Amino acid sequence: MTISSDRRCVVVCGSTKADSRTRAVSNVMAERLRQAGFAVSFIDTRQLVLPIADPEFHHSPDQHPEPAVRELSSTFDAAQAVVLASPVYHGSYSGVLKNLLDHLRWDAFARRPVGLIVHGGNPLSGTPVCDHLRSVVRTMAGYATQSQVVSGPADISWDDRGTTVLAEPVQLRIDRMAAELVELSVLLSRPRTKPTSRRELGRAKDMSSDGR
């Protein structure tokens, strides 16, 4: 399934390391999303310098005095999907990613699917970090995808041309996540129907009752 290129996805690499494997996986994910039809905004926290989040602007980041924060907010506002990528730092996600998220409104992910990528010293160390991020996504009103990408050092290499080569299971998870992001971004962008009233629910229950 592909979509028109007017749909946007923000991919955030939450690593400041120069030769980051998290960034390598994030770049592969971004390219896969472009192939699926997304216009991708790639945010690299090694290059994006943000101040420490100021709670005074928690509900209005578009009013922040720092231009980088205002641009960050508008980038997420324009997106229909998000990918968050982080290395494992002390059993959780990175501080630079946390600070970036703290600059956004509490509902910055509303009606948006959010994919999660975590790279650690071994694949098992990344799963709890994904769980931490799922809680954040839920709190920010988003929908974390069922698929997640967790990798370790043995899953990533580079060929003679410097092209990132991923282990087959990791590449398959990337493909699966990309497909989910496409499908969910379409479904979640549809207008919501009017919530069913309690009276209508009661009437439907009466009509479906078999008398037991």
Image: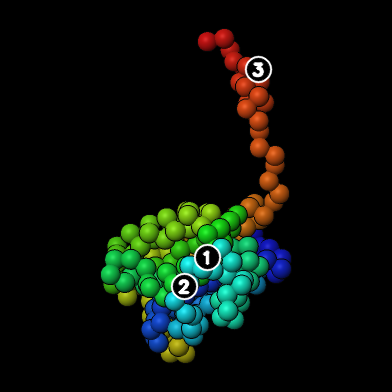
Out of 82 and 176, give the one closest to the viewer.
82
Task: Estimate the spatial distance between the alpha carbons at disc 2 and disc 1, rounded to whole Å.
Answer: 8 Å
Q: In percent of the image, x 66 and y 37: which residue is there?
A: 195
User: In the image, which disc is placed on residue 207?
Assistant: 3
| Badge 3: residue crowd in 10 Å (few <14, some 14–19, many ≥20) | few
Q: Is residue 192 above or below residue 30?
A: above
User: In the image, which disc is placed on residue 66?
Assistant: none
| Badge 2: residue crowd in 10 Å (few <14, some 14–19, many ≥20) | some
Q: Is residue 18 above or below residue 42?
A: below
Q: Looking at the image, tell me whether mark 2 or mark 1 is earlier in sequence order.
A: 2
Circle 2 sits on which residue? 53
Q: Looking at the image, tell me whether mark 2 or mark 3 is earlier in sequence order.
A: 2
Q: Residue 180 in the image: state x and y as whole percent.
A: 55, 57
Task: Estimate the spatial distance between the alpha carbons at disc 2 and disc 3, rounded to whole Å.
Answer: 54 Å
Q: Looking at the image, tell me whether mark 1 or mark 3 is earlier in sequence order.
A: 1
Question: Circle 2 sits in a helix, a strand or a loop, which is it?
Answer: loop
Question: Circle 3 sits in a helix, a strand or a loop, which is it?
Answer: helix
Please indicate, yes or no, whether residue 171 appears anywhere in the rendered image. Answer: no
Task: Estimate the spatial distance between the alpha carbons at disc 1 and disc 3, rounded to whole Å.
Answer: 47 Å
Q: Quadrant of the N terminus?
A: bottom right
Verify CB contact (< 8 Å) between mark 2 and mark 1: yes
User: In the image, which disc is placed on residue 58?
Assistant: 1
Left or right, residue 97 beside residue 199:
left
Q: Residue 175 in the image: state x and y as whole percent.
A: 52, 64
The amino acid type, in three-letter code, at marker 1 is His
Q: Residue 126 in the image: state x and y as whole percent.
A: 34, 64
